[in-house]
Amino acid sequence: MGIEKIVKAWDYADSHIHSQYSKLVDSWEKSGQSRYTLASAMLTPSFAAFIGGSGNYYTKALSTGLISYDLMQNISGIIEGDHEKGISSDGESLIVTNSYFLFMEKISKKARLPLFLTGTIFAAKGALGLYSYLSANEYSSLAGTASDFSTSMFCFGLSSSLYIKDTKPKIRQKTPFISRIYSLIDKSGFLKPKSTIPTLINASYKIPVI
């Protein structure tokens, strides 16, 4: 499998997961709720797992700055109705308003799928550990199982919060090529029929009385 196919598969997975969260947010917002309250609800167990001390140390260490940033963005969204993206538009061009927020937005979009996949892996690992305990009474696997579930909860919560806040990306709507060609021809007046009937200006008519 070439690099190009891997990139396409990666982008497809991210887009598919993103679309599922978009459906969830759409239903949530139709009930009159804010997406930021939903994102905060998802982040709460993640934050609890983060400060709880259990779970994979390296995963948490690498995500320390991201979860702090995401928590701040959720609070900002609840208060202000939107979160700071570090970029704005004046209608013609994009303007960078805060380089830090812009950088973190890019990191968030790159990190959400790895976090989601990591959460899936640790959830499966925890499930296997729980099965070993229930089937063979292996008490030694309980500590590792709890750590795996904690890491999974942390990763799922953070990735969910990141996906939820990015559920309405700007989609460039393209007009079909044939329609664009017809529109250009129509504006040129080439297709408009030319009238052969002479125009009478200031002509007066007498209507005969019967």
Image: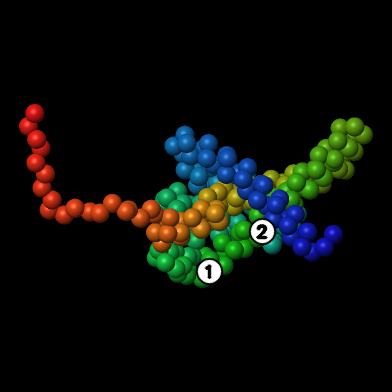
* Residue type, numbered disc 2: Ala
Tell whether 192 sits left or right of 9.
Answer: left
Q: Nearer the viewer, residue 120 or 134?
A: 120
Does residue 95 lie above or below 11 as drawn?
Answer: below
Indicate the position of residue 71 as horizontal and vertical percent values.
54, 54
Is label 1 in a helix, a strand or a loop?
helix
- Residue shown at the point (78%, 48%) measured from the top left: 121
- Give the spatial CA distance, label 1 vs label 2: 16 Å
> Which comes before the other along the chain, label 1 or label 2?
1
Residue matched to label 2: 111
Q: Mark 1 points at which residue?
A: 100
Residue at position x 47%, y 43% in the image: 34
* Residue sitting farthest toward the top: 210
At x 46%, y 59%, the residue is: 185
Looking at the image, which is closer to me, 72 or 162?
A: 162
Hey, which quadrant is residue 210 in on the image?
top left
Is residue 49 shown to the viewer in this render?
A: no
Secondary structure at numbered mark 2: helix
Residue density around tag 2, few if under 14, some if 14–19, many if 20 or more, within 10 Å: some
Decide: is 167 above or below 69: above
Q: Position of residue 144 (x, y in %)?
A: 82, 46
Residue type, numbered disc 1: Tyr
Q: Residue 118 carries which label?
A: none
Q: Can residue 129 be seen in this view?
A: yes
Q: Quadrant of the N terminus?
A: bottom right
In the rendered image of this protein, does residue 53 appear above or below residue 97?
Answer: above
Residue 170 is situated, as x and y percent measured from the top left of the image, at 52, 55
